[in-house]
Amino acid sequence: MPGALRSRRRAVTDRLRNNRRATIRLAGEHDIATAPDVTRRIDAALEAGVGCVRVDLDAVTFLDASFLGALVRGRRRCAAHEARLVVTCSNQRTRRVFAIAKLAALLHDHH
């Protein structure tokens, strides 16, 4: 699984815990340019055999429809591997984007 990747627009940190759960923490802006990278990270976690992939969006400042699509596809791939995709986000602005797109069900409510 890749290590940390940082740039001006975004920060991504992957962490594998007990070979059972992977956490992908994202920060900054995520759009059509970063969606494939997130897809690759979800796929890498599944290839490592994890049962749960957690995507943490707490530090995300912007996301677009292509990025939401990558998360929907990631959930499908996780289900095909008998794994769970858990998307967490405490940022109300980002949560609202999910609600407007009628994808609030993707979010794990951890409040």
Image: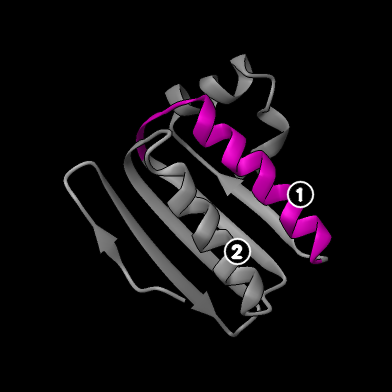
Q: Residues within 10 Å of mark 1 (few under 14, many from 20)?
A: some
Q: Say which quarter of the image contains residue 78.
A: bottom right
Q: Does residue 109 show up?
A: no
Residue 64 screen position, x and y as percent? 46, 26
Q: How is the image coloured?
A: one colour
Q: Would you place residue 98 above or below residue 21 in this image?
A: above
- Numbered label attached to residue 43: 2
Magenta stretch prevailing secondary structure: helix
Give the magenta part as a residue range: 60-81
Residue at x 76% of width, y 64% of height: 83
- For marks 2 and 1, give the CA distance: 11 Å
Q: Does residue 84 show up?
A: yes
Residue 92 screen position, x and y as percent? 47, 25
Residue pushed farthest bottom? 18
Residue at x 42% of width, y 67% of height: 14
Q: Would you place residue 55 above or below residue 3 in this image?
A: above
Residue at x 45% of width, y 72% of height: 15
Relative placement, left or right, of 87 versus 13 is right
* Secondary structure found at label 2: helix
Amino acid carrying label 2: it is Asp
* Secondary structure found at label 1: helix
Amino acid carrying label 1: it is Arg
Residue 47 screen position, x and y as percent? 64, 75
- Numbered label attached to residue 76: 1
Q: Nearer the viewer, residue 105 or 30?
A: 30
Residue 17 on the magenta span: no
Q: Would you place residue 68 above or below residue 74 in this image?
A: above
Q: Nearer the viewer, residue 81 or 95?
A: 81
